[in-house]
Image: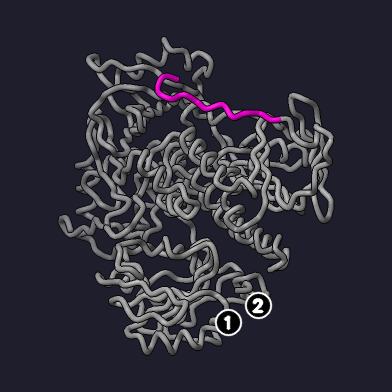
Amino acid sequence: MAGGLDLAEGFAGRGDDVYEALIRGHEGLTDEESAAMNARLVLILANQVRDPEAVIAAIRLARETARAG
Amino acid sequence: MGSYAAPRYEYVIPPELRGSPGARRPVVVVGAGPVGLAAAIDLAIHGIPCLVLDDNDTVSVGSRAICWAKRTLEIFDRLGVGDRMVAKGVTWQRGRVHRGDEEIYSFDLLPEGGHKMPAFINLQQYYVEEYLVERARDFPDLLELRWRNEVTGVSARGDGVVLEVATPDGSYRIEADWVLAADGANSALRRMLGLPFEGQAFEERFLIADVRMRAPFPNERLFWFRPSFHPGQSALLHRQPDDVFRIDFQLGPEADPVLERQPQRVIPRVRAVVGESTPFELEWCSVYAFRCARLERFVHGRVVFVGDSAHVVSPFGARGGNGGIQDVDNLCWKLARVVQGRAPESLVATYDGERRHGADENILNSSRTTSFMTPKTKVEHLFRDAVLDLAPRAAFARALVNAGRLSRPCTLAGHVLQTPDAAPWDGPAPGTVCPDAPILDEAGRPGWLLNRLGGDFALLVFAEDAAELAAMAARASCLGPPLVAIAPRSLQAPEGIVVLADPDGLARVRYAAEPGTTYLIRPDQHVAARFKSFDPGGIALALERAGGGVRPVRAAA
């Protein structure tokens, strides 16, 4: 756990299936359409978490792990 | 080729060209690569005469397939060459993945002990072929190798196949009941039979450089995303025997394959990896693109496709050569039974179903790795880099980093030969490869469980004491397969029963066994069925099913 986040693998061993579904979900979209889809997806998943503190901690982690350059 | 002197195998004028009419053969194998040779040896062990035709007279040029997985080594061990390969190979089990020059995670492919074979060895394909050729010579009455015998024509009939074979002394025809097409990714048999080979081609080009040097790289699989020595691309490094290292460089889709294999282009790339102070020699290099493809079916009448002729994958994950050896393991016991008249021809059809499933799993995994390594669109790049950015901090992201999902045997659960469990329980479910375990043999010597299984059906039974075992043996005697019993310590064995001691209890734990638990083991060391307590009626039905629908007849004593 990191600030209310559970970072352990939570894909029940099917991470590659989830990753492929994410990539396929974007097939044929322009960059703008993909960015918009990602925004909707973040909102859907943020709601699915059912824990505002965890969502806020996730936003913090995502911001912190941005690479310089 | 600095470190390896390739053997030349002598071409001999075939008897068909010296005036003696060739007899019809039960099995002809086309192709003397690792897959064809392994198939011929496996068939010979089953007592099936086998002729191997190869258009060349030596082993693989270049190291080609180098990573041999635990399951393949177990199969090679059953074929009698496993120890030699492990002794020569570089054993490894850990992979390290870097982003830039920093390690972001590592994985251990065999974190527990108590297995005879390691997770992986690296061994150049030319050694694998050389050792298999030498092993093949142990069967002079059954196994014939013909070098510089190229198949130039094939006509399939309902009950057999006629091959046209070209040699330096002219052509001849040979008839066979069965032909195994082990003639590789560019299979001539596949082309001559007009079979489509469909799949996905990848545009990305890669350079393989085999480099001979003294260098302190560990016996591990090292992978880099965008290392400073190869900006913007990925790289992979493996240690092989004889101080040879394999370095794979991603080159991008625009790379010129002819230009990129020139030493003046390759040497600076290698120099960037190994540094200025390490002298090295370039042994072999190749620039390649790849595709994932498979035949729609692997069995076409009496022609059976095995290995790369049936399916090709991208190289990341070592699923090509390993997949081919697993084809052999799956096919040969079935074909032997059919040739011997002990099973209906439909048993060979189950090879098709089981190994197409294996090929699909290999194609899926290696395609996903390739996609992760070579993102094509902006959004693919974003997700890939997001995973890499999160990986140092988040375990879930490390699980998504895909720098190769290394070869593992697929499960055959749900295929017709297996009898599903009545209720779920731990341990290897039907369709799973048998886990190994250390045992003490009848004379109290240390050994390995897998060395006592395979080749024929077996009943693996777990017993606590001699009386219980004797009772099971009496009830099993009419079933056919020999009993291999596991007991906590050595027991007074009933006549004809192998009793292996399991002093550390690892076999019992790995098989989730109680006294009376019985596993029906296929000749390829997969679980066909299992029974929590001894159940001769259930075993008899499962045996009939696993043998292709006929009740196996015990061989005459």
Badge 2 crowding class, 10 Å Cα cut-off, few under 14, some 14 to 19, many 20 or more, is some
**Does residue B376 show up?**
no
Q: What span is in magenta?
A: B1-12
Looking at the image, which is closer to me, B286 or A39? B286
* Residue type at the position of mark 2: Arg
Looking at the image, which is closer to me, B484 or B390? B484
In the rendered image, which quarter is residue B345 located in? bottom right
Q: Name the residue beneath numbered marker 1.
A: B540
Q: Give residue A52's position: percent from left, percent from top.
A: 23, 61
Q: Name the residue beneath numbered marker 2.
A: B551
Q: Give residue B72's position: percent from left, percent from top.
A: 46, 50
Residue located at (63% from left, 42% from top) = B182
Counting residues from the N terminus, which is met first, the one under dot 2 or under dot 1? 1
Q: Is residue B295 left or right of residue B459?
A: right
Q: Quadrant of the N terminus of chain A?
A: bottom left
Badge 1 crowding class, 10 Å Cα cut-off, few under 14, some 14 to 19, many 20 or more, is some
| Secondary element at image label 1 | helix
Q: Is residue B480 left or right of residue B170?
A: left
**Does residue B331 show up?**
yes
Residue located at (23% from left, 52% from top) = A58
Residue located at (32% from left, 51% from top) = B109
- Residue B40 falls within the magenta-colored stretch: no
Looking at the image, which is closer to me, B454 or B365? B454
Q: Are marks 2 and 1 in contact (CB under 8 Å)?
A: yes
Looking at the image, which is closer to me, B97 or B50? B50
* Residue type at the position of mark 1: Ala
